[in-house]
Image (spheres, rainbow, N blue to C red):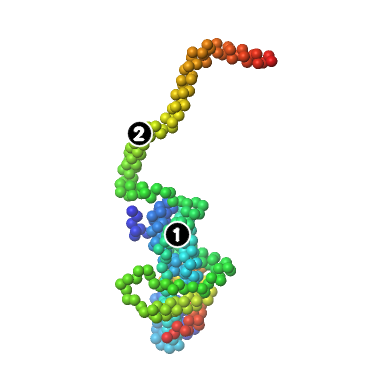
Amino acid sequence: MKCHQIQNRLSAFQDGELNDREQEKISEHLEKCSACRKRYEEMEKIWQALGDFQEIQPEPAFYRQVIKKINESNKPRFRVGFRDLRWLFQLFSPSWATAALLIGGVLMGTFLGNTLAKKELLPFQQNRTYSQAAAEVFSLKAFDPVPPGTLGERYLRMASYGEGGHR
Amino acid sequence: MIDPLVEDEKLMEETAQGDEYAFELLVKRHQSRILNLIFRFIGNRTQAGDLAQEVFIRVWQAAPRYKPQAKFTTWIYRVATNLCLNELKSSSRRKLLFSEIPADAGRTPNEEGTVTPSAEDILLAEERSRQISHTLQNLPENQRMALILKRYDNLSYHEIANIMDCSVSSVESLLVRAKRNLQEKLIFFEK
C-alpha cells in the first residue's frame, strides 16, 4: 500500500475498525514510514485533546421535569394510585394479591357502608324526611270522600273532563 | 421492585404498560449520556437540557409502539440525533450556538473526598473545554455527530451508521473529514 492509501485508512485504523490483516499492514507501514507516522501521531494528539471536553451533569430534578412535561401534555398515561398498589403484586403472587385486594375491597365497603348508615349519609336516608311526609299526606287522603285510585275518583275525573270538553 | 439491572428493552415494555418506575429507571440510566451527546453537539447547556428532556418525552410517547429490533441505546441515540439535527435546521436556534460552556461543566455536585484542583487549573480546563466545544460547533453537522458518537460514546461504525441512517463507508468518510478538519482547527492544542 502506498502512503496516500495508508493515510486514507488511518482514521479507521485509529478507531480499530479494520480487519486484522489491514490493521497489521498499517502498523508495519507506520513503523517504517516517518511521514505517515507523524500524521498518525498528530491524529492521536487531536483525539486526546478532544478528551478535555468536560461533561455536564443532569439537573437533580431532570426526571421530575420530564414527568411534569409529560403530565402537562395532552395524554398523561400514568395513573395516579397504580404505583401504590404495585408492591402488593411484587410481594405476593398475582392470585394472592388479587384475593387480598378483593377481601380488602369487601371489608372497606362494609366498614364505609356501616359508618355512612350510622351517620345517615346514604342517599336514600337523606330523602327520608321527604318520603315520610309524602307517605303521610298520601295516607290521609284515604279519609277523603273520594279516595285516590278508587272507581268513584275515576268517574269524577272523567265527568269533569267531559264537562270541560263540552265547553 | 424491578431489578435495576434489568435490560432496557424490558423496561420499555413496562413503560409501555404505564409503569412509571420502569420509565424512571430508563431515564436515570441514560440521562447523562443523552444530555452530554446533545450538549457536545449543540454547545449550550440550557438548550441541551431541554432537548434531552424532549428525547425522554418521545421515548415515553413511543413506548407502546416500540419494537426491540435494534439495541435500545441505538434507538434512543437515533431519537436524540434526529432531534439535534432537526433543531439545527431552525435558523433562530443557530444564534444560540457558540454560546456557553457553563462554569460548572465537568464538576459534579458534592465532589467530596477527591483531590481538589486549583482555581487556575479549573479555569484552564474550562477554557480548553470551551475551545473544543467551539471547534466542534464549526464542523459540518454530520461530521460533528459522527465524531461525537465515536469519540465520546465509543460506538462502532456500524452503530453510528444505524443511528445516522447511512452506510458504514459514509461514517468512515465523515470521520476522515472530521478529523482532518479538526487537525486544522485544533492546532493550538499542540503542546
Disc 2 target residue: A114
In the displayed structure, B188 sits above or below B142; it is: below
What chain letter is assigned to the residue under label 1? A
Asked if labels 1 and 2 share a chain, the reply is yes
In the displayed structure, A94 sits above or below B120; it is: above
Residue at image location 40% in from the left, 52% down from the top: B19
Mark 1 or 2, closer to the camera: 2
Residue A65 drawn at (x, y percent): 45, 59
The kind of residue tagged 2 is: Asn
Residue B119 drawn at (x, y percent): 38, 79
In the displayed structure, A8 sits above or below B33; it is: below
Residue at image location 32% in from the left, 41% down from the top: A100
Figure quadrant of residue A67: bottom left
The kind of residue tagged 1 is: Gln
SS of the residue under disc 1: helix
Disc 1 target residue: A65
Q: How many marks?
A: 2
Residue A14 seen in render? no
